[in-house]
Image (spheres, grey):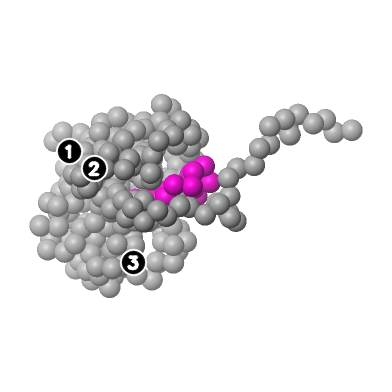
Amino acid sequence: MRILVINPNTTAAMTEKIGAAARRVASPGTEIIAVNPASGPVSIEGYYDEAISVPGLLEVIRQQKDFDAVVIACFDDTGLDAARCVTDRPVVGIGEAAYHMATMLSNKFSVVTTLGRSVPALEHNLHKYGLAARCARVRSSEVPVLDLEKPGSDACDRISAEIGLAISDDRAEAIVLGCAGMTDLAAQLAAEHGVPVLDGVVCAVGLCEAMARLGLRTTRAGGYAPPRDKSGAGDRKVA
């Protein structure tokens, strides 16, 4: 089995970290292909970055032909719906995966993400997935995404402090880490706080393996139908 894990931003160090996390949980015989687009934003922090990263993300899927499933390794689930139109293989966003798993492990969970500007997008996704009622709160640690890659950064301490508030103030029974760049922190933070701390990268890999093993494919009907061929349509002159 081959799983394509796409980091939609262009920071190679983050892609390597995401790939390493995915390989740690992948089953024997599962190959992880961790890649990022050649062009796009160096980090995704909010609606604008998300929008300009989608063309590069879709191009990666078009170029990679031999895979059994795709993980979109951005917690905003960047370009998820569009990606499902490009391939009939299962495509799983790490936000979507972590939310669903958290609902099966707890009554209420909180999300701890990076910057406050990312909170509305995550709240929007929770409503879209029908899971807003299960989320106590989406919290921001005010840690820029790229700080997660800096040696000596206090990012982990700030994220941990926000998790403490989520447990005490939100009464959260589980925590979802709201950034792919936090993937290496989950085990440490779970041990520190005594509640499940979910990383979407590993959650998505597990779901992709299960769906591929079951032979499931993304529907080609309705909204996930393949893009129509519109070549030459924009060249028509108005009489």
Residue at mark 2: 29
Q: Nearer the viewer, mark 3 or mark 2?
A: 2
Question: Which residue is drawn at the image coordinates 60% and 56% (left, top)?
Answer: 222
**Residue 38 falls left or right of residue 112:** right
Who comes first in sequence, dot 2 or dot 1? Answer: 2
The image shows a total of numbered marks equal to 3
> Could you say where residue 208 lies in the image, as x and y percent from the top left?
34, 51
**Which of 155 and 209 lies nearest the eye of the viewer?**
209
Q: Residue 201: image x %, image y %? A: 28, 48
Residue holding disc 1: 153
* 58 falls in the magenta region: no
Say which element carries label 1.
loop
Instruction: Using the image as rendered, state which of residue 190 and residue 62 is in the foreground.
Output: 62
Q: In the displayed structure, would residue 147 be above or below residue 97?
A: above
- For the residue marked with disc 2, what is the amino acid? Gly
Q: CA distance from mark 1 to mark 3?
A: 28 Å
Side of 39 where 135 appears, left or right = left
Q: Choose mark 2 or mark 1, whichever is in front.
A: 2
Q: Amino acid at mark 3?
A: Cys
Q: Residues within 10 Å of mark 1 (few under 14, many from 20)?
A: few
In the rendered image, the residue lying farthest to the left is 192
Residue stretch rendered in magenta on the structure: 81-95
Q: Residues within 10 Å of mark 3 (few under 14, many from 20)?
A: many
Question: Where residue 67 sits in the image (x, y, percent)?
Answer: 38, 39
Q: Is residue 105 shown left or right of residue 225?
A: left
Residue at image position (52%, 54%) is: 219
- Kindly identify which residue carries mark 3: 135
Instruction: Measuring from the top left, give residue 42's x and y in whole percent.
Output: 36, 32
Give whichever of discs 1 and 3 has the lower sequence position: 3
162 vs 84: above or below: below
Q: Which mark is residue 63?
A: none
